[in-house]
Image (cartoon, rainbow, N blue to C red):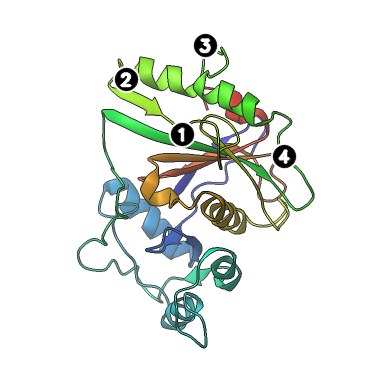
């Protein structure tokens, strides 16, 4: 589930439910108004826990989703851009009342939920779309605003550490190799920012993992995607997934520590 922080002049667009696969990629979940209301109610009363519980989806969609994960001839798991292209645009809940499966799915390896101290490995991704659109700040500027690597004194790192009384320590990869600056990777995606957020997130993830060789849901505690702007279903400054490693910022809002 993601919750979106609104822009000053935005409309309340509410939550979005997605199916997070074992490999960390996501597919939006649709359902009837009654089913989505039930999901929100269960989320709020604690009987449904984001990133832990599983729900039953339509049988046909489940088969289509399973088929999209492997090569149709070799049967080998798809990865990267091939996987992004094969994933369905959405899946639907099974008809009737929402069915939460017994037990809880295994969390992604390396994920540390509800942790209140320790080291937090962070990566910021400066995204460049098919048309060359990206925030005007280069990787150095993004790094400075998030980590204070070039003298900025009010940053994500400084505020997380100060507000936690230094119980959290923010760490990042050093500049060099695949990293365009300290804690920052730049990637180009083969789609435009005017496409759906789900497609953008999956494309960014494939590009970053292809460039760095790391798995974002396993090798980092927090990964922020920085987009030049939102062009579809806007009204938000940033959003993040509950109990997850991923957040997305648009426009200038990645520079606001309050966001």
Query: Which sits earlier in the primary sequence, circle 4 or circle 3?
Result: 4
The span from disc 3 to disc 2 (Cα, nearest Å) is 17 Å
Quarter of the view holding residue 256: top right
Q: Taking 63 as reference, is 85 left or right?
A: right
Expressed as whole percent of the image width and height from the top left, the position of residue 127 reads 65, 43
- Whether the residues at callouts 2 and 4 have beta carbons within 8 Å, the answer is no
Furthest residue in direction front, as rendered: 177
Q: Are marks 1 and 3 in contact (CB under 8 Å)?
A: no
Residue at 49% x, 49% y: name it: 15
Q: Residue at x 29, y 66 (%)?
A: 100
Q: How far, Cα to Cα, is label 2 from label 1? A: 22 Å
Question: Which residue reaches farthest right?
Answer: 131
Residue at image coords 59%, 65%: 81
Is 194 left or right of 158, judged from the image as shown? Answer: right
Q: Is residue 45 above or below residue 30?
A: above
The residue singled out by tag 2 in the image is 164
Among numbered discs 2 and 4, the one appearing first in the sequence: 4
Provide the residue designation for mark 4: 134
**Residue bearing mark 3:** 153
104 w.r.t. 132: above or below: below
Q: Position of residue 135 (x, y in %)?
A: 71, 34
State whether residue 204 appears in this view: yes
- How far apart, in angstroms, are the residues tagged by discs 1 and 3? 19 Å
* Label 2 environment density (alpha carbons within 10 Å; few <14, some 14–19, many ≥20): few
The secondary element bearing badge 1 is classed as loop
Circle number at residue 231: none
Mark 1 vs mark 4: give the one in front. 1
Badge 1 or badge 3: first in the primary sequence: 3
Name the residue: 70% across, 40% down.
229
Neighbour tally class for label 3: few under 14, some 14-19, many 20 plus, Cα within 10 Å: some
């Amino acid at each position: 589930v993601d919750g979106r922080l609104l822009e000053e002049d935005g409309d309340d667009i509410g939550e979005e439910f997605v199916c997070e696969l074992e490999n960390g990629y996501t597919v939006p979940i649709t359902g009837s108004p009654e089913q989505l209301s039930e999901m929100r109610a269960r989320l709020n009363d604690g009987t449904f826990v984001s990133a832990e519980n599983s729900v039953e989806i339509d049988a046909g969609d489940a088969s289509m989703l399973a088929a999209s994960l492997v090569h149709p001839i070799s049967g080998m798991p798809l990865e990267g851009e091939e996987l992004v292209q094969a994933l369905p645009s959405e899946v639907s809940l099974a008809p009737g009342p929402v069915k939460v499966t017994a037990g809880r799915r295994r969390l992604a390896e390396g994920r540390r939920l509800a942790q209140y101290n320790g080291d937090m490995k962070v990566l910021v991704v400066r995204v460049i779309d098919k048309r060359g659109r990206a925030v005007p700040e280069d990787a150095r500027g993004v790094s400075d605003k998030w980590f204070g690597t070039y003298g900025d004194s009010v940053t994500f790192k400084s505020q997380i550490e100060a507000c936690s009384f230094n119980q959290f320590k923010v760490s990042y990869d050093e500049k060099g190799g695949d990293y365009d600056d300290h804690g920052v990777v730049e990637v180009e995606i083969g789609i435009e920012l005017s496409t759906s957020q789900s497609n953008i997130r999956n494309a960014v993830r494939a590009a970053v993992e292809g460039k760095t060789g790391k798995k974002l849901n396993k090798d980092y505690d927090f990964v922020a995607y920085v987009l030049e702007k939102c062009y579809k279903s806007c009204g938000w400054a940033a959003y993040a997934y509950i109990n997850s490693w991923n957040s997305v910022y648009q426009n200038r809002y990645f520079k606001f520590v309050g966001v």
